[in-house]
Amino acid sequence: MPQRALLYRRPSEPQAIEIVFDRSIYLVRVRRHRQARRYTLRIQSATREVVLTIPPRGTLKEAREFAQKHGGWIAARLDRLPKAAPFAEGVIVPLRGTPHRITHRRDVRGTVWTGADADGNRLLCVTGNAPHIDRRINDFLRREAKRDLEAASLHYADMLGVRVKRVSVRDQSSRWGSCSTSGVLSFSWRLILAPSAVLKYLAAHEVAHLVEMNHSARFWRLVQRLCPDHERAKIWLDVHGTDLHRYGLPDTSREFG
């Protein structure tokens, strides 16, 4: 193997390390980058992941010391982000913009459904054993997202006389939707958490790209034609979009002692 390749090869390095600050433990993902000149830390706001970049000649010992030295910065940045809301009993999750409390109905038949309590509060009911709540809620929300996004996309495509090849939903952290030249539309499943008008705007936005693969004035005229209230939906995403990424995420810190 060439010496240059050996310089970057660290087969025994862990993918993540733990640091302690103020009686809490934080998980930090480590990545080695051959173009990095120094140790750097960053927080991915959508996933709440802490990432430590190591330069080619850096050591894991120095990296750990660097992360530990900046434990206060990590804690402060994470604390400023919206709190993680894992899919668990009692957690309130928005569905189409309406708050629903996750309620575990272990001995009832079925999987996941919506309902209401005696006071009219909306519920998201889930059956099965407690360890399966997260997966079942996640699967349910993805199915609902795909159903709503397919319906909206096909409706807008019919308005423009274009064809949608396929609609897929994923957990995209950097964008809400995308459109390929082949007619495949991809969306974040988290749009099902937003008000329906926001989901419909994103569908209209990506369908408009089937005609105009750009953000020209002509493109925005198409969006306006499909979704006259799109400006309000855009503002909602700018203000509340980041908050949608906290649902279904585990809390990456834990206390000890």
Image: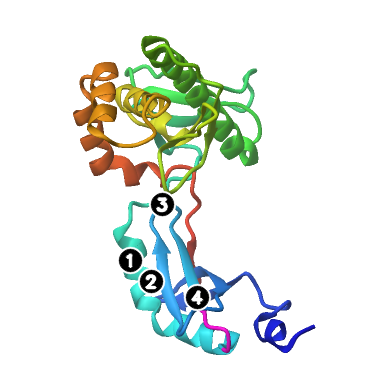
**Residue 46 marker:** 3
Nearest the viewer among 247 and 113 is 247
| Quadrant of the drawing holding the N terminus | bottom right
Left or right: 64 with respect to 243? Answer: right
Q: Nearer the viewer, mark 1 or mark 4?
A: 4
Give how far across and how far down residue 130 sits, in percent.
61, 38
- Real-space Cα separation, disc 1 to disc 4, in angstroms: 17 Å
Within-10-Å neighbours for mark 3: few <14, some 14–19, many 20+: some
- Real-space Cα separation, disc 1 to disc 2, in angstroms: 5 Å
Q: Amino acid at mark 4?
A: Thr
Q: Secondary structure at mark 3?
A: loop
- Real-space Cα separation, disc 3 to disc 2, in angstroms: 15 Å
Give how far across and how far down residue 37 sits, in percent.
46, 84
Nearest the viewer among 125 and 155 is 155
Within-10-Å neighbours for mark 4: few <14, some 14–19, many 20+: many
- Real-space Cα separation, disc 3 to disc 1, in angstroms: 13 Å
Within-10-Å neighbours for mark 2: few <14, some 14–19, many 20+: many
Per the picture, the main secondary structure of the magenta-coloured stretch is loop
Q: Which residues are magenta?
A: 53-57
Q: Amino acid at mark 3?
A: Ala
Does residue 35 appear anywhere in the picture?
yes
Q: Are marks 1 and 2 in contact (CB under 8 Å)?
A: yes
**Disc 2: which residue:** 74
